[in-house]
Amino acid sequence: MARSMNTAARSTNASARSTNRSVPVRPWRGLVLAGAALYFLVPLAASVIFTVDVPGEGVTFDAYTQIFGTDGFVSSLLLSLELAAATIAIVLLLMVPAMVALRLGAPKLRPVVEVVCSLPLVVPPIAFVAGIGTVLKWGPEHLSRTPLFQTFTAIQNPDFPFVLVLAYVVMALPFVYRALDAGLRAMDVRTLVEAARSCGAGWPQALVRAVLPNLRGALLNASFLTLALVLGEFTVAQLLGFQPFAVWIVNVSGSQAQLSVAVSVLSLLVTWALLLALAGFGGRSRTAPRG
């Protein structure tokens, strides 16, 4: 008995010493973080200095105060936000039911769907927009006597170019697929759906009440990535002749360089704020069920 007690005491002391032992500090982690911070913060600081330092006038914030009064700022920003909202709604309505059905009914087709959703990363935007332009030119010429002619005209309305929404949906597929796939992998979809079905819920109710609440973080991530894509996309909108927010910034930069950089800095800060808010909201949603 005494021997066993001594052995237990020695093991307890050894475990206490192991827990009290300090974790070795790895300085290369700090160097990597410092290098990443310099890589991102130095260009941002240079941009801010460029916008506030006016030769002969000193430090002034006129570039930021003139943003909201510049022609085209409000209209282009609202257009980009409208396009982003429509893109988010359409891509989520397409991908969420498709991925849930894929996970429940045909899991072997997941590699095929993954390859198809990753194709926009392989096709260059120039080739993509060239194909869209060719279709838009071909449609009115060959469908002028059919009801589809009005459709081709309506989707190119400058007030709300729905053709950009269709293009952005395709371009957002890789990011939305990755976000939703990560969310679906973190939960047992089949058990949730079967439990909802056993309680008398139909398939739409099972999807809305059982699956979507557990996909809140994935839906937020997909929405944020799509919003960032739409706000920063330039090539497709420029070549098709429309002027959302990114195209307006480039057009303004030719005549008012400081103003365009100030708008870019402001949009970057807003994007960071949205990312931090998303991270905080996602963290609270994960800790709430634990409490």
Image (tube, rainbow, N blue to C red):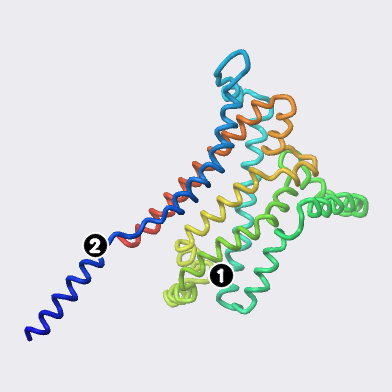
Looking at the picture, how far across and down is residue 174, in whole percent?
A: 64, 60
Q: Does residue 79 lie above or below 223 as drawn?
A: above
Q: Does residue 92 lie above or below 72 as drawn?
A: below
Looking at the picture, how far across and down is residue 178, in whole percent?
A: 58, 62
Specify whether 204 is left or right of 123.
left
Q: Name the residue beneath numbered marker 2.
A: 20
Q: What residue is rendered at 6% in x and 83% in y?
A: 2
Within the image, what quadrant is residue 238 found in? top right
Q: How many neighbours does mark 1 have within 10 angstroms: few (below 14), some (14-19), or many (20 or more)?
A: many
Q: Are marks 2 and 1 in contact (CB under 8 Å)?
A: no
Specify whether 1 is left or right of 211.
left
Disc on res. 232: none
Q: Nearer the viewer, mark 2 or mark 1?
A: 2
Q: Farthest residue toward the top?
A: 56
- Give the camera-side residue of 161 and 274: 274
- Give the camera-side residue of 257 and 212: 257
Looking at the picture, how far across and down is residue 267, in whole percent?
A: 58, 37
Q: What residue is rendered at 85% in x and 54% in y?
A: 135
Amino acid type shown at disc 1: Val
Amino acid type shown at disc 2: Asn
Total count of labels: 2
Q: What residue is rendered at 63% in x and 46% in y?
A: 84
Secondary structure at badge 2 equals helix
Q: CA distance from mark 2 to mark 1?
A: 47 Å
Within the image, what quadrant is residue 282 found in? bottom left
Q: Does residue 6 lie above or below 143 as drawn?
A: below
Q: Name the residue beneath numbered marker 1.
A: 100
- Give the camera-side residue of 186 and 93: 186
